[in-house]
Amino acid sequence: MAADDGKRKISESTIQRLSIYYRVLSILKKEDIKTISSKELAKQEKLTPAQVRKDLSFFGSFGTRGLGYPVTELKNRIANILGLDREWKVAMVGVGNIGSALVGYKEFQRHGFTISMIFDNDQRKIGSNHKGILVSDIANLKEGLRENKIDIVIIAVPATVAQYIVDDIVEAGVSGILNFAPINLKVPDHVILRNENMSMELEHISFSLVNRESITATKE
Amino acid sequence: MAADDGKRKISESTIQRLSIYYRVLSILKKEDIKTISSKELAKQEKLTPAQVRKDLSFFGSFGTRGLGYPVTELKNRIANILGLDREWKVAMVGVGNIGSALVGYKEFQRHGFTISMIFDNDQRKIGSNHKGILVSDIANLKEGLRENKIDIVIIAVPATVAQYIVDDIVEAGVSGILNFAPINLKVPDHVILRNENMSMELEHISFSLVNRESITATKE
DNA sequence: CGGACTATGTGAATTCATTCACAAGTTACT
DNA sequence: AGTAACTTGTGAATGAATTCACATAGTCCG
Ligand SMILES: NC(=O)c1ccc[n+]([C@@H]2O[C@H](COP(=O)([O-])OP(=O)(O)OC[C@H]3O[C@@H](n4cnc5c(N)ncnc54)[C@H](O)[C@@H]3O)[C@@H](O)[C@H]2O)c1
Ligand SMILES: NC(=O)c1ccc[n+]([C@@H]2O[C@H](COP(=O)([O-])OP(=O)(O)OC[C@H]3O[C@@H](n4cnc5c(N)ncnc54)[C@H](O)[C@@H]3O)[C@@H](O)[C@H]2O)c1
């Protein structure tokens, strides 16, 4: 039977959870644990066993009844599903506060995302080295992305210029974008765009705090 | 009728969207636009008008039929719902790569989140200044949080020590935590914990890229 | 002031996601 | 080999979120 790569519709949340399983499995593997049941896997991350099994079942059946899932095998299989069994070439655009923090982030490399190019428009930065990567002139963005066959671009420039840059990135044929600017970028349908908006996370916290303040609300 | 603060169950996604509406409304206000319809508001962010109206309807009815929503009023109301009409006292724990980027992030301040304390365990950093904030010794974490009545803590320390620090934070009575370490932290039910996991976002992108590669997949 | 138009607010219908519950496969032990 | 104990994989049931569709209420302009 051919590789299982139909066009099933996988929900956003299932994808998120696959990442979570992957992380847990990596740890289990390091601890030299050979198998894990859906029950255990679920407990670690406050999910339900049924959910774990259902998520995995979308992609095949990897477990052994009565025993559980083989850790290493499942980890590899999830890596394959998530596309972590290959190297992704990543470029960073904007190497200011957040950009330079991210360039040095080990976790990316560990999951197969290699940042190999950096672009900026600041003359003082262009030509300099950041963690061993030469900062290129933003003027060369399109050619640079094409020549280096970049798969994914991380946007870490001010919101005001982000759309222009995204347009170039799309024109250069890149179809994966991770955006840190707090703005809704417009991209064609075939481009995968994800946004990381930290203010929104804080706002979620403040909402939750406000809407449960009653717990401690002793009048005055 | 008294302030509308029942215990309705608002979905995660509605809360996220409120943040989005808030951002759009802020821009509209700056552009001096007085009213906006659910249709327009939806279009800006690729949502449906019905969804906008439904989201807002959970909290009351702010619109005018035939006209739309009054921008300033709605913005203020959402600010109130999200708890952005007050100041939140925030502390940063760990001022390395990501921690120091975040300390200087203007957007937080603009939404009412004021970072007023920083903790670290690195002797070279303790006592120094980061964007005008004195770096305190992590040993003083609990007292510091209590004395300064910190509402929310941002965790930007290595994953290996994050849980210990969270335990202290919880003991200190803080009930909002934004975590950047790629680890599942355990907190009591009354504590609001949100995780920001950037690798997961990249993995989401690679998953999507792999699962639609067929589009450009001309065999070799 | 009246009629054409516009847009809200919301039950009802639908779609999507999670949980239940159990038949069936595997282990482990005697 | 037989049996007790586990745990998967998955349809069916439930629950949650989104979308539909329309009655209702306001605007706007001549
Ligand atoms: N600082 C944070 O912690 C943080 C957190 C989340 C999101 N963000 C967002 O990330 C983006 C960058 O934030 P920052 O704090 O790093 O800002 P920054 O000003 O420190 O960095 C921006 C960088 O982009 C470069 N740049 C500006 N215009 C450019 C252009 N046209 N082409 C190429 N490069 C250009 C600048 O030279 C600078 O190096 C902003 O959109 C911000 O809202 C920042
Ligand atoms: N660098 C990034 O772009 C990035 C992105 C996302 C998430 N993260 C996560 O954020 C965390 C920090 O990453 P980083 O790159 O800033 O690392 P870093 O090593 O640059 O910074 C960590 C800081 O925490 C301090 N620290 C260590 N142990 C401590 C303790 N017990 N008490 C108080 N402070 C302590 C260190 O002194 C240092 O200042 C990690 O968990 C990392 O996975 C980093």
Image (cartoon, coloured by chain):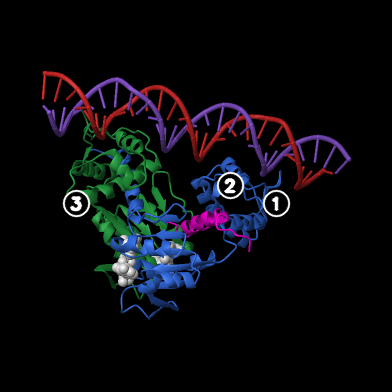
Chain colours: A green, B blue, C purple, D red
- Which SS class for mark 3? loop
- Which SS class for mark 1? loop
* Residue that carries the numbered disc 1 in the rendered image: B2
Asked if residue C22 is positioned above or below residue B113 in the image, the reply reads above
Which of the two residues, B220 or B37, is positioned nearer the viewer here? B37
Q: Amino acid at mark 2?
A: Lys
Asked if residue B140 is positioned above or below residue B206 in the image, the reply reads below
| Marked residue chain, label 1 | B
Q: Main secondary structure of the magenta part?
A: helix
Marks 2 and 1, Cα distance to the nearest angstrom?
Answer: 14 Å
The location of residue B119, given as percent across then percent down, is 38, 72
Residue A215: within the magenta? Answer: yes
Q: Which residues are magenta?
A: A196-220
Marks 3 and 2, Cα distance to the nearest angstrom?
Answer: 43 Å
Which of the two residues, A9 or A39, is positioned nearer the viewer here? A39
Which label's residue is closer to the chain start, 2 or 1?
1
Q: Quadrant of ligand 1?
A: bottom left
**Disc number at residue B7?**
2
Query: Are dots 3 and 1 in contact, CB under 8 Å?
Result: no
